[in-house]
Image: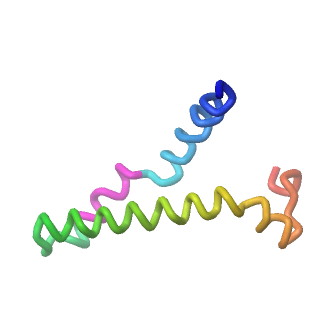
Amino acid sequence: MEGLWTYLLLCLPSVFIIVDPPGAIPVFLAMTGHNTLEEQRAMARRACTLSLGVLITFAVSGNLLFNVFGITIAALR
């Protein structure tokens, strides 16, 4: 269990930096400025759910995709 916590502490900041939620706020508000607060919340929930689904899909199938395309970790370095 300790290994899981270590892994999460290493990965979550990286994911947060890549996704950049604070940077997306102005874009989201500019795109949804004409919508009601309830509509904005529904769109934000939908966007977060979709983003989580994409992140989980690639986290689970990332190795498989690398193997299919013949990409090695050494090639990425």
Q: Residue at x 84, y 53 (%)?
A: 73
Q: Residue at x 89, y 68 (%)?
A: 70
Quadrant placement of the N terminus: top right
**Residue 24: x, y in percent?**
36, 58
Q: How many marks?
A: 0
Determine whether 74 is above or below 41 in the image.
above
Q: Determine which quarter of the picture holds residue 62.
A: bottom right
Determine whether 72 is above or below 4 in the image.
below
Q: Is residue 25 magenta?
A: yes
Q: Determine which quarter of the picture holds residue 11.
A: top right
For this rendering, which residue is in front, 1 or 74? Answer: 1
Q: How is the image coloured?
A: rainbow
Lateral position of residue 58 relative to residue 20, left or right: right
Lateral position of residue 36 relative to residue 26, left or right: left
For this rendering, which residue is in front, 6 or 23? Answer: 6
Q: Residue at x 10, y 70 (%)?
A: 36
The secondary structure that dominates the magenta segment is helix
Lateral position of residue 32 relative to residue 12, left or right: left
**Residue 56: x, y in percent?**
57, 58
Residue found farthest to the front: 1
Q: Is residue 26 magenta?
A: yes
**Residue 6: x, y in percent?**
64, 28
User: Which stretch is magenta?
Assistant: 21-29
Lateral position of residue 28 relative to residue 68, left or right: left
Q: Determine which quarter of the picture holds residue 28.
A: bottom left
**Residue 7: x, y in percent?**
65, 35
